[in-house]
Image (cartoon, rainbow, N blue to C red):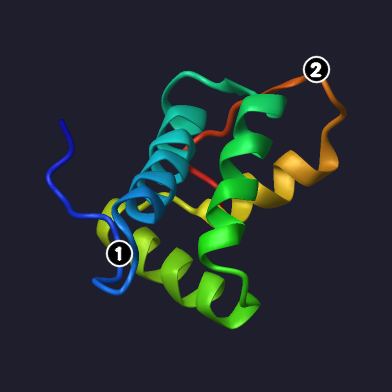
Amino acid sequence: MKEYTYPISMDWTTQEIIDVVQFFESVEKVYEQGMERKRLMERYRKFKKVVPSIGEERKIFREFEEVSGLSAYHVVKKMKELKEGQMIRLSSNFD
């Protein structure tokens, strides 16, 4: 189990918190074992319903990277580059 907390807002509903946490769990999975692009895209779409603003997304992604060392930005960027049906997996050494 991870020893950090996810960046969440107390203004979000329980379901919105679940959607955001599931997205960040998916980011972790991409780094740990990989994930199907379609599944990640579904979770990202739910995340974007909670956090529609690009500025807020960047802020939350930065907070997540600070506590986890994992880049949600790189995961989303790679997801957008891949085609439907492909697996996405990243190494945590993204120099």
Helix, strand or loop at mark 1: loop
Q: Earlier in the sequence, mark 1 or mark 2?
A: 1
**Residue at 12% in and 44% down:** 3
> In the figure, 20 relative to 61: above or below?
above
Question: Between 64 and 23, which is closer to the camera in this rendering?
Answer: 23
Q: Dot 1 surroundings within 10 Å: few (below 14), some, or many (20 or more)? A: some
- Is there CB contact under 8 Å for labels 1 and 2? no
Position of 9 with respect to 31 (left or right) is: left
SS class, disc 2:
loop
For image coordinates 52% across by 34% down, the residue present is: 91
Write the residue at 33% across / 60% down.
13
Q: Is residue 51 left or right of residue 28?
A: right
Q: Position of residue 47 (x, y in %)?
A: 53, 53
Q: Is residue 39 above or below residue 26?
A: above
The amino acid type found where label 2 is placed reads: Gly
Tell me the tag on residue 22.
Answer: none
Quadrant of the snapshot with the N terminus: top left
Q: Is residue 23 above or below residue 85?
A: below
Q: Residue 77 location, x and y as percent? A: 71, 51
Question: Which residue of the protein is positioned furthest toward the bottom in this rendering?
Answer: 55
Residue at 32% across / 65% down in the picture? 66
Viewed as shown, does residue 84 lie left or right of 67? right
User: Which residue carries the number 2 mark?
Assistant: 85
Residue 8: image tag: 1
What is the x, y in percent for residue 26?
47, 34
x and y percentages locating residue 88 in the rendered image: 66, 27
Q: Quadrant of residue 80?
A: top right
Kindly report which numbered mark, 1 or 2, lies closer to the viewer in this rendering.
1
